[in-house]
Amino acid sequence: MIVVMKPNATPEEIKEVIRRAEAMGVQTHPIYGQQRTVVALVGDLTRVSREVFNAMDGVRETVRIQEPYKLSSRTARPENTVVELAGGRVRIGGPEIVVMAGPCSVEDRQQTIEVAHAVKEAGAKILRGGAFKPRTSPYSFQGLGLKGLEYLADAREATGLPVITEVMTVDAVPMVAEYADILQIGARNMQNYGLLQAVGKVQRPVMLKRGMSGTIEELLMCAEYIISNGNTQVMVCERGIRTYETATRNTFDLNAVPVIKQNSHLPVVADPSHGTGYREYVPAMSRAAIAAGADALILEVHPDPDNAASDGRQTLSVEAFGELMTSLNRIAEAVDRYIGDRVLQLA
Protein backbone atom coordinates (compact mmCIF):
# COMPACT_ATOMS: atom_id res chain seq x y z
CA MET A 1 0.00 0.00 0.00
CA ILE A 2 1.13 3.56 -0.58
CA VAL A 3 0.07 6.65 1.31
CA VAL A 4 -0.07 9.54 -1.15
CA MET A 5 0.67 12.87 0.47
CA LYS A 6 -0.85 16.18 -0.57
CA PRO A 7 1.45 18.49 -2.58
CA ASN A 8 1.65 20.89 0.39
CA ALA A 9 2.20 18.20 3.04
CA THR A 10 4.77 19.28 5.62
CA PRO A 11 7.81 17.24 6.68
CA GLU A 12 6.16 16.80 10.08
CA GLU A 13 3.02 15.34 8.50
CA ILE A 14 5.11 12.89 6.48
CA LYS A 15 7.03 11.85 9.60
CA GLU A 16 3.77 11.28 11.46
CA VAL A 17 2.55 8.92 8.72
CA ILE A 18 5.83 7.01 8.99
CA ARG A 19 5.60 6.89 12.78
CA ARG A 20 2.00 5.63 12.70
CA ALA A 21 2.80 2.93 10.12
CA GLU A 22 5.86 1.66 11.97
CA ALA A 23 3.82 1.50 15.16
CA MET A 24 1.56 -0.93 13.27
CA GLY A 25 4.57 -3.15 12.60
CA VAL A 26 5.15 -2.48 8.88
CA GLN A 27 8.18 -1.18 7.03
CA THR A 28 8.06 2.30 5.51
CA HIS A 29 9.82 3.62 2.43
CA PRO A 30 9.24 7.31 1.70
CA ILE A 31 9.54 8.13 -2.01
CA TYR A 32 10.10 11.78 -2.85
CA GLY A 33 9.15 12.53 -6.45
CA GLN A 34 8.77 15.66 -8.51
CA GLN A 35 5.01 15.22 -8.77
CA ARG A 36 4.21 13.78 -5.36
CA THR A 37 5.58 12.29 -2.16
CA VAL A 38 4.36 8.86 -1.15
CA VAL A 39 5.11 6.58 1.77
CA ALA A 40 5.19 2.93 0.71
CA LEU A 41 4.10 0.45 3.38
CA VAL A 42 5.37 -3.11 2.99
CA GLY A 43 5.11 -6.19 5.15
CA ASP A 44 2.07 -7.70 6.86
CA LEU A 45 -0.70 -5.18 6.09
CA THR A 46 -3.58 -7.24 7.46
CA ARG A 47 -3.88 -4.99 10.52
CA VAL A 48 -3.33 -1.73 8.62
CA SER A 49 -6.45 0.36 8.13
CA ARG A 50 -6.56 2.63 5.11
CA GLU A 51 -9.17 4.76 6.88
CA VAL A 52 -6.69 5.62 9.63
CA PHE A 53 -4.24 7.09 7.13
CA ASN A 54 -6.90 8.72 4.96
CA ALA A 55 -7.97 10.74 8.02
CA MET A 56 -4.46 12.02 8.78
CA ASP A 57 -3.33 15.57 8.07
CA GLY A 58 -1.44 15.96 4.81
CA VAL A 59 -2.69 12.69 3.30
CA ARG A 60 -4.48 12.83 -0.06
CA GLU A 61 -5.31 9.13 -0.45
CA THR A 62 -4.15 5.57 0.09
CA VAL A 63 -3.68 3.17 -2.83
CA ARG A 64 -3.31 -0.59 -2.83
CA ILE A 65 -0.40 -1.82 -4.95
CA GLN A 66 -1.59 -4.81 -6.95
CA GLU A 67 1.85 -5.87 -8.20
CA PRO A 68 3.88 -8.21 -5.97
CA TYR A 69 6.89 -5.95 -6.48
CA LYS A 70 5.81 -2.98 -4.37
CA LEU A 71 8.79 -0.61 -4.42
CA SER A 72 9.81 -1.38 -8.01
CA SER A 73 6.35 -0.69 -9.38
CA ARG A 74 5.24 2.27 -11.43
CA THR A 75 2.30 2.62 -9.01
CA ALA A 76 4.63 3.45 -6.13
CA ARG A 77 6.73 5.82 -8.22
CA PRO A 78 5.22 7.16 -11.47
CA GLU A 79 8.40 9.06 -12.35
CA ASN A 80 11.44 7.31 -13.79
CA THR A 81 14.31 6.57 -11.44
CA VAL A 82 17.52 8.19 -12.69
CA VAL A 83 20.80 6.63 -11.55
CA GLU A 84 23.54 9.23 -11.24
CA LEU A 85 27.30 8.66 -11.43
CA ALA A 86 30.45 10.75 -11.51
CA GLY A 87 28.92 13.65 -9.64
CA GLY A 88 25.90 13.78 -11.93
CA ARG A 89 27.87 13.80 -15.19
CA VAL A 90 26.40 10.41 -16.09
CA ARG A 91 22.65 9.89 -15.68
CA ILE A 92 20.95 6.61 -16.58
CA GLY A 93 17.19 6.78 -17.01
CA GLY A 94 16.88 10.26 -18.49
CA PRO A 95 16.84 11.43 -22.11
CA GLU A 96 20.44 10.36 -22.74
CA ILE A 97 21.08 6.75 -23.70
CA VAL A 98 24.23 5.71 -21.86
CA VAL A 99 26.61 3.20 -23.40
CA MET A 100 28.75 0.94 -21.20
CA ALA A 101 31.57 -0.80 -23.07
CA GLY A 102 34.75 -2.75 -22.50
CA PRO A 103 36.19 -6.26 -22.39
CA CYS A 104 34.32 -9.24 -21.01
CA SER A 105 37.33 -9.99 -18.80
CA VAL A 106 40.08 -7.74 -17.51
CA GLU A 107 43.24 -9.37 -18.85
CA ASP A 108 46.02 -6.93 -18.00
CA ARG A 109 46.54 -3.29 -17.11
CA GLN A 110 47.61 -2.12 -20.57
CA GLN A 111 44.68 -3.78 -22.30
CA THR A 112 42.18 -2.32 -19.85
CA ILE A 113 43.45 1.25 -20.18
CA GLU A 114 43.75 0.92 -23.97
CA VAL A 115 40.14 -0.21 -24.30
CA ALA A 116 38.94 2.48 -21.88
CA HIS A 117 40.49 5.24 -24.01
CA ALA A 118 39.07 3.71 -27.19
CA VAL A 119 35.49 3.33 -26.00
CA LYS A 120 35.51 6.78 -24.42
CA GLU A 121 36.67 8.33 -27.70
CA ALA A 122 33.79 6.57 -29.48
CA GLY A 123 31.23 7.94 -27.02
CA ALA A 124 30.89 5.39 -24.21
CA LYS A 125 30.26 6.85 -20.76
CA ILE A 126 31.02 3.81 -18.57
CA LEU A 127 33.78 1.18 -18.69
CA ARG A 128 32.73 -2.44 -18.23
CA GLY A 129 35.10 -5.25 -17.39
CA GLY A 130 35.01 -8.47 -15.40
CA ALA A 131 37.47 -9.00 -12.56
CA PHE A 132 35.58 -12.06 -11.31
CA LYS A 133 34.08 -14.32 -13.99
CA PRO A 134 31.43 -16.98 -13.37
CA ARG A 135 32.11 -19.65 -15.99
CA THR A 136 30.29 -22.83 -16.94
CA SER A 137 33.54 -24.79 -16.76
CA PRO A 138 35.73 -24.63 -13.64
CA TYR A 139 38.74 -24.88 -15.98
CA SER A 140 37.92 -21.70 -17.91
CA PHE A 141 39.51 -18.34 -17.12
CA GLN A 142 37.95 -17.09 -13.87
CA GLY A 143 39.26 -13.53 -13.90
CA LEU A 144 42.12 -11.73 -12.16
CA GLY A 145 40.24 -10.94 -8.97
CA LEU A 146 41.62 -8.07 -6.89
CA LYS A 147 44.31 -7.33 -9.45
CA GLY A 148 41.57 -6.91 -12.06
CA LEU A 149 39.75 -4.44 -9.82
CA GLU A 150 42.96 -2.45 -9.46
CA TYR A 151 43.39 -2.34 -13.24
CA LEU A 152 39.83 -1.07 -13.64
CA ALA A 153 40.54 1.64 -11.07
CA ASP A 154 43.68 2.60 -13.01
CA ALA A 155 41.62 2.87 -16.20
CA ARG A 156 39.09 5.08 -14.43
CA GLU A 157 41.92 7.30 -13.22
CA ALA A 158 43.33 7.54 -16.76
CA THR A 159 40.03 8.25 -18.53
CA GLY A 160 37.50 9.50 -16.00
CA LEU A 161 35.06 6.73 -16.95
CA PRO A 162 33.03 5.20 -14.11
CA VAL A 163 33.43 1.43 -13.82
CA ILE A 164 30.89 -1.39 -13.73
CA THR A 165 31.99 -4.88 -12.72
CA GLU A 166 30.39 -8.02 -11.35
CA VAL A 167 30.26 -9.05 -7.72
CA MET A 168 29.63 -12.77 -7.16
CA THR A 169 29.58 -13.37 -3.41
CA VAL A 170 28.36 -11.66 -0.27
CA ASP A 171 31.89 -11.62 1.19
CA ALA A 172 33.22 -9.81 -1.89
CA VAL A 173 30.69 -6.95 -1.79
CA PRO A 174 32.78 -4.53 0.37
CA MET A 175 35.92 -5.12 -1.74
CA VAL A 176 34.19 -4.70 -5.10
CA ALA A 177 32.26 -1.65 -3.85
CA GLU A 178 35.58 -0.04 -2.93
CA TYR A 179 36.72 -0.16 -6.57
CA ALA A 180 33.55 -0.13 -8.69
CA ASP A 181 31.06 2.64 -9.38
CA ILE A 182 28.30 0.15 -10.31
CA LEU A 183 27.91 -3.33 -8.87
CA GLN A 184 26.70 -5.87 -11.42
CA ILE A 185 24.66 -8.88 -10.34
CA GLY A 186 25.06 -11.49 -13.05
CA ALA A 187 22.34 -13.65 -14.56
CA ARG A 188 23.41 -16.70 -12.56
CA ASN A 189 22.99 -14.73 -9.32
CA MET A 190 19.66 -13.04 -10.05
CA GLN A 191 17.97 -15.07 -7.32
CA ASN A 192 20.90 -15.16 -4.90
CA TYR A 193 18.87 -13.46 -2.21
CA GLY A 194 21.70 -13.10 0.28
CA LEU A 195 23.76 -11.27 -2.34
CA LEU A 196 20.79 -9.07 -3.29
CA GLN A 197 20.31 -8.08 0.33
CA ALA A 198 24.03 -7.36 0.71
CA VAL A 199 24.21 -4.98 -2.27
CA GLY A 200 21.01 -3.38 -1.00
CA LYS A 201 22.92 -2.25 2.08
CA VAL A 202 25.74 -0.44 0.24
CA GLN A 203 25.54 2.95 -1.39
CA ARG A 204 26.54 1.91 -4.89
CA PRO A 205 24.27 1.72 -7.94
CA VAL A 206 23.40 -1.85 -8.89
CA MET A 207 22.71 -3.37 -12.30
CA LEU A 208 20.68 -6.55 -11.91
CA LYS A 209 20.77 -8.94 -14.87
CA ARG A 210 17.79 -11.09 -15.74
CA GLY A 211 18.38 -14.77 -15.11
CA MET A 212 18.57 -17.03 -18.13
CA SER A 213 15.22 -18.61 -17.18
CA GLY A 214 13.81 -15.72 -15.16
CA THR A 215 10.47 -14.10 -15.87
CA ILE A 216 10.03 -10.35 -15.89
CA GLU A 217 8.06 -10.53 -12.66
CA GLU A 218 10.83 -12.56 -11.02
CA LEU A 219 13.40 -9.99 -12.18
CA LEU A 220 11.44 -7.14 -10.61
CA MET A 221 10.89 -9.14 -7.43
CA CYS A 222 14.67 -9.59 -7.19
CA ALA A 223 15.10 -5.83 -7.65
CA GLU A 224 12.65 -5.49 -4.77
CA TYR A 225 15.10 -7.29 -2.48
CA ILE A 226 17.73 -4.65 -3.21
CA ILE A 227 15.42 -1.66 -2.87
CA SER A 228 13.76 -2.94 0.30
CA ASN A 229 17.20 -3.08 1.93
CA GLY A 230 17.73 0.64 1.35
CA ASN A 231 19.43 0.96 -2.05
CA THR A 232 17.14 2.73 -4.53
CA GLN A 233 19.80 3.14 -7.25
CA VAL A 234 18.88 -0.01 -9.17
CA MET A 235 18.86 -0.82 -12.90
CA VAL A 236 17.59 -4.02 -14.49
CA CYS A 237 19.24 -5.61 -17.51
CA GLU A 238 17.76 -7.73 -20.31
CA ARG A 239 20.55 -10.07 -21.46
CA GLY A 240 18.68 -12.82 -23.25
CA ILE A 241 16.86 -15.87 -21.93
CA ARG A 242 17.23 -19.57 -22.60
CA THR A 243 14.72 -21.01 -25.07
CA TYR A 244 14.66 -23.93 -27.51
CA GLU A 245 16.33 -21.77 -30.20
CA THR A 246 19.93 -22.74 -30.99
CA ALA A 247 20.80 -20.26 -33.74
CA THR A 248 21.91 -17.74 -31.11
CA ARG A 249 23.46 -18.10 -27.68
CA ASN A 250 20.30 -16.78 -26.01
CA THR A 251 16.97 -15.37 -27.15
CA PHE A 252 17.22 -11.60 -26.77
CA ASP A 253 13.80 -10.72 -25.33
CA LEU A 254 13.26 -7.16 -26.48
CA ASN A 255 9.62 -7.45 -25.39
CA ALA A 256 10.98 -7.07 -21.88
CA VAL A 257 12.10 -3.48 -22.44
CA PRO A 258 8.68 -1.85 -22.99
CA VAL A 259 7.00 -4.23 -20.54
CA ILE A 260 9.39 -3.25 -17.74
CA LYS A 261 9.18 0.42 -18.66
CA GLN A 262 5.39 0.29 -18.39
CA ASN A 263 5.29 -1.55 -15.08
CA SER A 264 8.39 -0.25 -13.28
CA HIS A 265 10.20 3.04 -12.81
CA LEU A 266 13.66 1.40 -12.90
CA PRO A 267 16.07 2.13 -15.78
CA VAL A 268 16.40 -0.70 -18.30
CA VAL A 269 19.79 -1.74 -19.70
CA ALA A 270 20.05 -3.95 -22.79
CA ASP A 271 22.90 -6.43 -23.31
CA PRO A 272 22.91 -7.54 -26.97
CA SER A 273 26.37 -9.11 -26.59
CA HIS A 274 25.08 -11.85 -24.29
CA GLY A 275 21.62 -11.64 -25.81
CA THR A 276 22.85 -12.92 -29.17
CA GLY A 277 26.28 -14.42 -28.52
CA TYR A 278 27.49 -13.46 -32.00
CA ARG A 279 29.19 -10.16 -32.77
CA GLU A 280 27.60 -9.87 -36.23
CA TYR A 281 24.14 -9.60 -34.63
CA VAL A 282 25.11 -7.12 -31.93
CA PRO A 283 24.74 -3.92 -34.04
CA ALA A 284 21.22 -4.73 -35.21
CA MET A 285 20.05 -5.69 -31.72
CA SER A 286 21.69 -2.60 -30.21
CA ARG A 287 19.74 -0.38 -32.57
CA ALA A 288 16.55 -2.35 -31.89
CA ALA A 289 17.02 -2.01 -28.13
CA ILE A 290 17.23 1.77 -28.40
CA ALA A 291 14.12 1.84 -30.57
CA ALA A 292 12.34 -0.33 -27.95
CA GLY A 293 13.09 2.20 -25.20
CA ALA A 294 16.24 0.95 -23.45
CA ASP A 295 17.95 3.55 -21.26
CA ALA A 296 21.45 2.08 -21.67
CA LEU A 297 23.45 -0.52 -23.55
CA ILE A 298 26.23 -2.71 -22.20
CA LEU A 299 28.56 -3.99 -24.94
CA GLU A 300 31.69 -6.11 -25.02
CA VAL A 301 34.64 -4.52 -26.85
CA HIS A 302 38.21 -5.82 -27.19
CA PRO A 303 41.25 -4.81 -29.29
CA ASP A 304 41.57 -8.40 -30.56
CA PRO A 305 38.26 -10.26 -30.01
CA ASP A 306 39.44 -13.54 -31.53
CA ASN A 307 42.09 -13.80 -28.83
CA ALA A 308 40.03 -12.51 -25.90
CA ALA A 309 40.25 -14.50 -22.67
CA SER A 310 36.46 -14.95 -22.63
CA ASP A 311 33.41 -14.45 -24.86
CA GLY A 312 35.43 -13.40 -27.88
CA ARG A 313 32.78 -14.63 -30.30
CA GLN A 314 30.27 -12.02 -29.12
CA THR A 315 32.78 -9.20 -28.67
CA LEU A 316 33.10 -6.22 -31.01
CA SER A 317 36.44 -4.90 -32.19
CA VAL A 318 37.32 -1.32 -31.34
CA GLU A 319 36.74 -0.34 -34.98
CA ALA A 320 33.34 -2.05 -35.14
CA PHE A 321 32.29 -0.38 -31.91
CA GLY A 322 33.14 3.04 -33.31
CA GLU A 323 31.07 2.38 -36.41
CA LEU A 324 28.17 1.15 -34.31
CA MET A 325 28.15 4.27 -32.15
CA THR A 326 27.68 6.43 -35.25
CA SER A 327 24.59 4.50 -36.28
CA LEU A 328 23.20 4.44 -32.75
CA ASN A 329 23.10 8.23 -32.68
CA ARG A 330 20.72 8.23 -35.64
CA ILE A 331 18.36 5.76 -33.95
CA ALA A 332 18.46 7.75 -30.70
CA GLU A 333 17.48 10.93 -32.50
CA ALA A 334 14.58 9.12 -34.16
CA VAL A 335 13.10 8.39 -30.72
CA ASP A 336 13.81 11.89 -29.35
CA ARG A 337 16.84 10.88 -27.30
CA TYR A 338 20.60 11.26 -27.67
CA ILE A 339 23.92 9.55 -27.01
CA GLY A 340 27.02 11.26 -25.66
CA ASP A 341 27.50 14.92 -24.85
CA ARG A 342 25.48 16.26 -27.74
CA VAL A 343 22.12 17.55 -26.48
CA LEU A 344 19.21 16.77 -28.77
CA GLN A 345 17.44 19.85 -30.05
CA LEU A 346 13.76 18.97 -30.15
CA ALA A 347 11.46 20.79 -32.53
Image: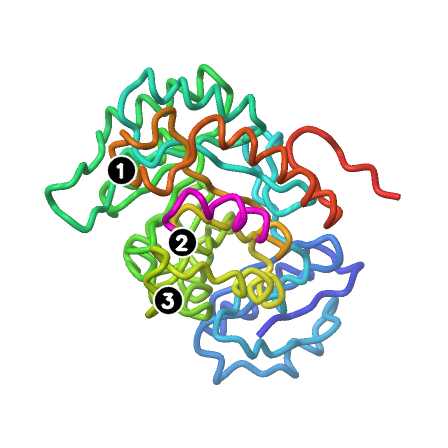
| Residue 287 coordinates in the image, percent (x, y) | 59, 47
Q: Is residue 212 above or below residue 136?
A: below
Q: In the image, is 344 to the left or to the right of 249? A: right
Q: Residue furthest right?
A: 347
How far apart are labels 1 and 3 at the CA level? 24 Å
Check disc 2 and report the residue beneath it. 209
Residue 139 sits in quarter: top left
Which amino acid is tagged 1? Ser
User: Please, what secondary structure does the residue beneath circle 1 have?
Assistant: loop
| Residue 86 coordinates in the image, percent (x, y) | 55, 29
Q: Is residue 132 above or below residue 162?
A: below
Proximity of marks 3 and 2: CB atoms separated by less than 8 Å: no
User: Does residue 188 appear anywhere in the picture?
Assistant: yes
Check disc 3 and report the residue beneath it. 214
Which amino acid is tagged 2? Lys
Q: Which mark is residue 153?
A: none
| Residue 265 coordinates in the image, percent (x, y) | 60, 59
Which amino acid is tagged 3? Gly
Q: Give the mark toward the camera: 2 or 1.
A: 1
Residue located at (44% from left, 78% from top): 44
User: Does residue 17 appear anywhere in the picture?
Assistant: no
Proximity of marks 1 and 3: CB atoms separated by less than 8 Å: no
Q: Residues within 10 Å of mark 3 (few under 14, many from 20)?
A: some
Check disc 1 and report the residue beneath it. 310
Instruction: Find the magenta span and give its range.
Output: 277-288
Q: In the image, is 52 to the left or to the right of 124? A: right
Residue located at (40% from left, 43% from top): 202
